[in-house]
Amino acid sequence: MRISTRWNDSVVPAAIILLLVVCADPIRAEIEELDSIVAIVNNDVIVRSELEHEIRRTMVQLQESGEAIPARSILEHRVLDEIILERLQAQQAETLGLDVSDAMLNEAITSIAQRNNLTLEELQMTMEAGGMSYEQFREDTRQKMLTQRLQAEEVIKKIRVSNQEIDRFLATNSDSLVEREEVRLQHILIALPEDPSASQVEQARRKAQGLVAKLRAGTDFAQTARSSSDGGRAQEGGDLGWFNINEVPSLVTEQARTLAKGEISDPLRSPSGFHIIKMADIKGSGPGTVRQTHARHILIRTNELVSDEDAQIRLNQLRIRILGGADFDQLARSHSDDTGSALKGGDLGWVSPGDTVPAFETAMDSLAPNDVSQPFESPFGWHIIQVIERRDQDTSADALRLRAREAIQERKASGAMDEWLQRLRGDAYIEVRID
């Protein structure tokens, strides 16, 4: 019904006013419910609309993975807790002056597109076709990068690994450090019918989880595949043969790169059912001769007082002085914010591929010996680099120990991260306003 905006009298009839008031109350109540505060995190708030958005997204992810969706109250509290932890980390990053610039974000998104064999335009269309705004995807990616940078600064760098721990790891897990070229996989499928019911999915999941438990306890994989698998290679013991590491089916890409020899995966859900994968064998090569670079740098960190433009201007001035004959060593001692290398005149020693963040390595690799780079940005701030010399070095033993150290750090990171998040939460003011 359309109400005319033209009136014969100068006063709106009382009946119309009453109608508008009565109709407005449910609308106002709905808006207030949608935007009501569900939690306070220090000086920030989380509103109902944010929580509902994340709940919907979580439910989609659970449905796609085939996982059971918990009761509404459990899901609501679980998702709210995740939002609170994300908010606390964002606040901590802001306190420390950490950020992710547009240049760093663009580089990361370009890398995501390239890994999926897409152009940026195709990636944007893919996002929007899936019902996700490209701007929201950019913002989510920025927040993930910021969280990773914060966790690296606050947790990962502080994890200590002893030489004895490295020795023990290499004695039992050295094959996991091999650069994988081919993998041999075995497979068990617990099939699902087309358009299965919730009970059929749950029954198949339990069967797959039961088989995984038996296989990890020592039951023979090939015999189990012959007796229990619905896969096409069941009578061959589930043997799928050898795969080039870059040609592994997308469902098991992560498992092909991370499972140790003989290890059994958790059940993996696909439209056809639940899959169990065993890493039967691995072919590859360990670290060998690498090209190392001896370099030094000057770092200017940005913060509330030093902008990106300020950092670039200062580094350009220092670069001009170096090219004019000024001593890099002295300028680094006086101006670099990297206290560890500044005491050594900015000297980083011999750097191997992968030792530094991608932006730094790219800039360093583009320089000839004695060249000084233009100012460039990395997650740590703005730099200029000078390459002193390069060499080819057999680093097999050193590289294996470095990879072992990183693997041990990853194992320790989960517990260390939980402790750090608990401290972060314990030091915060948090008020939850849902039952």
Image (tube, grey):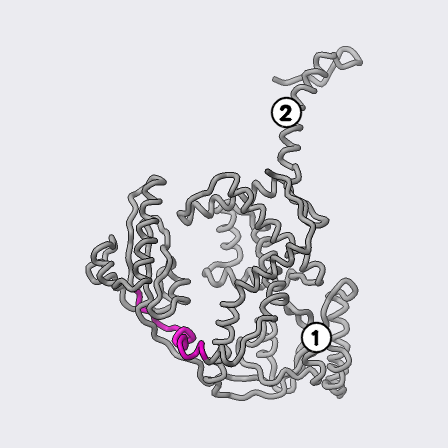
Q: Residues within 10 Å of mark 2 (few under 14, many from 20)?
A: few
Q: Quadrant of the N terminus?
A: top right
Tell me: residue 238, above or below residue 404: above
Q: Residue at x 74, y 70 (%)?
A: 311
Q: Report the amino acid beneath label 1.
A: Leu
Where 418 falls versus 203 (above or below)? below
Q: Indicate which label's residue lies in the foreground, 2 or 1.
A: 2
Q: Mark 1: give few (<14), some (14-19) or many (20+) Cα within 10 Å.
A: many
Label 2: state its secondary structure.
helix
Residue beneath disc 2:
26
Q: Is residue 92 left or right of residue 187?
A: right
Specify whether 365 is left or right of 411.
Answer: right
Residue at image point 44% right, 84% down: 288
Depth order, front residue of 149/120: 149
Query: Which span is picked out in magenta?
Result: 168-185
Direction from residue 238 to residue 334 in the image, left or right: right
Q: CA distance from mark 2 to mark 1?
A: 58 Å
Inspect the magenta stretch and tell me whether residue 412 lies in it: no
Quadrant location of the C terminus in the rendered image: top right
Instruction: Give the labeled residue for mark 1.
Output: 299
